[in-house]
Image (cartoon, grey):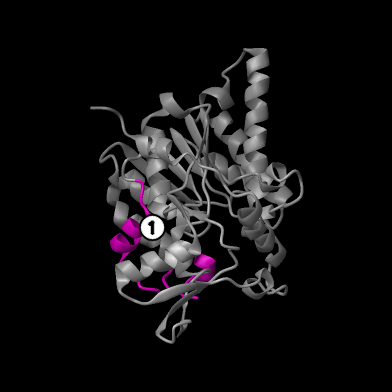
Amino acid sequence: MQKQKTILVIGATGAMGRAVVEQLLTQAPDAFRVRIYTRDPTSPQALRLLAQGGPRIEAARGDIGSGDQLAAALQGVDGVFCNTDFGNARSVSGEYEQGVRALEAAQKAGVQHFIWSSLDACSTLSGGRLPVPHYDAKAAVAHYIDRQRSDEFLRQDGDGFYSRHVSTLITGPYYENLMTLFRPRPGKLRDGRDGMIFAFASGGKPYPMVALDDIGWFAAHLFQNPEKFVGRTLPIMSQSLTLDEVAQTFTRVTGIPAEHQDIPLEVQWPAAMPIAHDLWNMQRYVQEIGWQRDYDALRRIHPGLQSFETWLRRTGWQGEAREVQKAFARR
């Protein structure tokens, strides 16, 4: 019988981390043991994960800012999934330092496969015109990984950690954000009916999104197939839809009348809101440039990649608030 791999999940109690843990436990039964890295193993999110995984899951208490705690958590670990929190780091340089610190600690511990959870490099891809700090922070770590791979190629010596043991998974906005940040509100539709209004500054452009379960699926798949994905960067999404298509699909699936109403950025994200300018540029980036993905190639890897309609039917969501990100629980 093949030895179980122990995977340390950094950011395990967040929205993405929980999805990764759940897929590691269910996608390949008996293939993985999971160690969640959390500041508070007694939090409701941590306790739910620990109850779900039974003897295959354990908690390691620690903060990514503590080198000693991180080194202890990495002992005996085969793989790491790392998703840092921009809100915790509070700056681009802070999150960059967290990511580099985690990579260096994993290399020192002899980790065989490290997956860095990244986002698109909006500042770079827009020629510096549209910086999106909470995206660019993670992308800066992805750039660091690429630089290390290039240096390893030139040297052709040593273990080649970044070329032989590190994957980058580029994700994006979740479908589940519609349950919190982008939740529709009840109101009068343009035709006078009562319904749900998706008020969103889209400019009529498609908005790519990814199901949290799909992120978890890809993470588990990469850990199961390291020979195909180490040294690689894989950008993923589930589907790209206009907000009009989101509203139409919502109506078709739920039977609840809905429509999209385009609104100005400053209405959706008032200037007094924390990181409002960051979010303005994120949506400007979608409107003016957009995130590009090869959906046919992604479906060849993951035939069950969820459309928005599939996700709606699976979750049974009808516009109500649900807990997703800890910071926006039941907002």
Residue 310 part of the magenta segment: yes
- In the displayed structure, does residue 287 sit left or right of residue 53? right
- Which image quadrant is residue 282 in? bottom right
Q: Which residues are magenta?
A: 305-331
Using the image as rendered, state which of residue 124 and residue 90 is in the foreground. Answer: 124
Which residue is outermost to the front? 191
**Residue type for callout 1:** Phe
Q: Is 274 drawn above or below residue 69 in the view shown?
A: below
- Which image quadrant is residue 195 in? bottom left
Question: At numbered mark 1, what does the secondary structure look like: helix, strand or loop?
Answer: helix
Q: Is residue 13 among the parts visible in the rendering?
A: no
- Which image quadrant is residue 41 in? bottom left
Q: Is residue 102 among the parts visible in the rendering?
A: yes
Q: Residue at x 52, y 23 (%)?
A: 164
Q: What residue is shown with label 1?
A: 308
Percent x, y for residue 135? 63, 50
Q: Quadrant of the N terminus?
A: top left
Using the image as rendered, state which of residue 307 and residue 70 is in the foreground. Answer: 307
Q: Is 262 drawn above or below residue 89 in the view shown?
A: below
Percent x, y for residue 111? 49, 30
Percent x, y for residue 182? 52, 69
Residue 314 part of the magenta segment: yes
Q: Residue at x 38, y 52 (%)?
A: 213
